[in-house]
Amino acid sequence: MAVFTEVSESSAQELLTQLQLGELVELKGIQGGIENTNYFLTSSTGPYVLTLFERLTHEQLPFYLYLMKHLAQGGIPVPDPVSNQTGDILLTVEGKPAAVVNRLRGKSELNPSPAHCAAVGDMLARMHIAGRNYNRQQSNLRGLSWWNETVPVVLPHLDQTQATLIQTELAYQNHIAASSAYTAMPRGPIHADLFRDNVMFDGTLEAPELTGFFDFYFAGVDTWLFDVAVCLNDWCITHVDGAHDAAKAQAFVAAYQAVRPFTPAERQLLNPLLRAGALRFWTSRLWDFHLPREASMLQPHDPTHFERVLRQRVAHPVTL
């Protein structure tokens, strides 16, 4: 991801020594994203990823790191944080909270087939079930309360048509969140950001092997359906115009429900949650685009993409 904090090779070697991971072979900043500083950290014992957290605090981070540890121990392919000699997985590098995890094999698939979508749906349902007995609590920090705080901040950067859309949608989402159907939906730890570039695959296009979910640093306790909606809004659309891709969506949903069938409330609220997912990422991308932080290699995402997705979800509701 973007490099906000430069890490020297001597600091990296000191960290590897603390973690008993051998000698430094290569330290390379990772381009893309907008939240944390990430490096590929290769040592004589293998490939790892070093993350320095630029917004999350030492108090917030145990939820994310121990969630990954919990899921890894439950058989879900996620990065497993490395502990130091005293058993700590939350570290400090260059004065910032940090973590080192194993690097997953494979690569992201940015042009997924229905088979890729099915693999993600299956594993997401397994992840939700594996997280049910996770005992730490952390709200979704980019959920409804954040939208209510942030939409007024980005409004001055919108034209009148955009401003009307985002304010109308925010009011609609507050209405949905107050409904009995919303309250009835099952919830637990969710990834909340499971885009195509946060999943790794090996194998072939015809028979892909999902090798991991990563970048859990937007995770929180929320409705499982919101996690599904975020995925459908990225994996199962036509990216030129944000339109729904029925074949990919059907593959995803069928695989998910084969592991964990939707409840009646979830079936009722699928399209409202698809709209919620689009609003969340339109808002955050507007914020990152118009109110950016300085960083080496920072490339903010185009906010208009999720404006298009939201307009599609409003004009063409998706039902099961």
Image (cartoon, grey):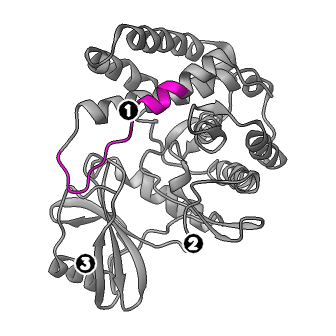
Q: Judge the density around disc 2: few (<14), some (14-19), many (≥20) Cα neighbours within 10 Å.
A: some
Given the image, on which type of amino acid does mark 2 rest? Gly
Q: Quadrant of the C terminus?
A: top right
The picture places residue 31, in percent across and down from the top left corner, at 33, 60
The picture places residue 62, in percent across and down from the top left corner, at 39, 54
Residue indicated by mark 3:
15
Residue indicated by mark 2:
106
Query: Which region shows up in magenta?
Result: 294-308
Q: Who's the residue at 43% across and 68% down the image? A: 81
Q: Nearer the viewer, mark 2 or mark 3?
A: 2
- In whole angstroms, how far apart are the C-alphas of marks 1 and 2? 29 Å
Comparing 30 with 77, the one in front is: 30
Which disc number belongs to residue 284?
1
First of labels 2, 3 by sequence position: 3
Given the image, on which type of amino acid does mark 3 rest? Leu
First of labels 1, 2 by sequence position: 2
- In whole angstroms, how far apart are the C-alphas of marks 2 and 3? 26 Å
Q: Quadrant of the N terminus?
A: bottom left
> Tag 2's secondary structure?
loop
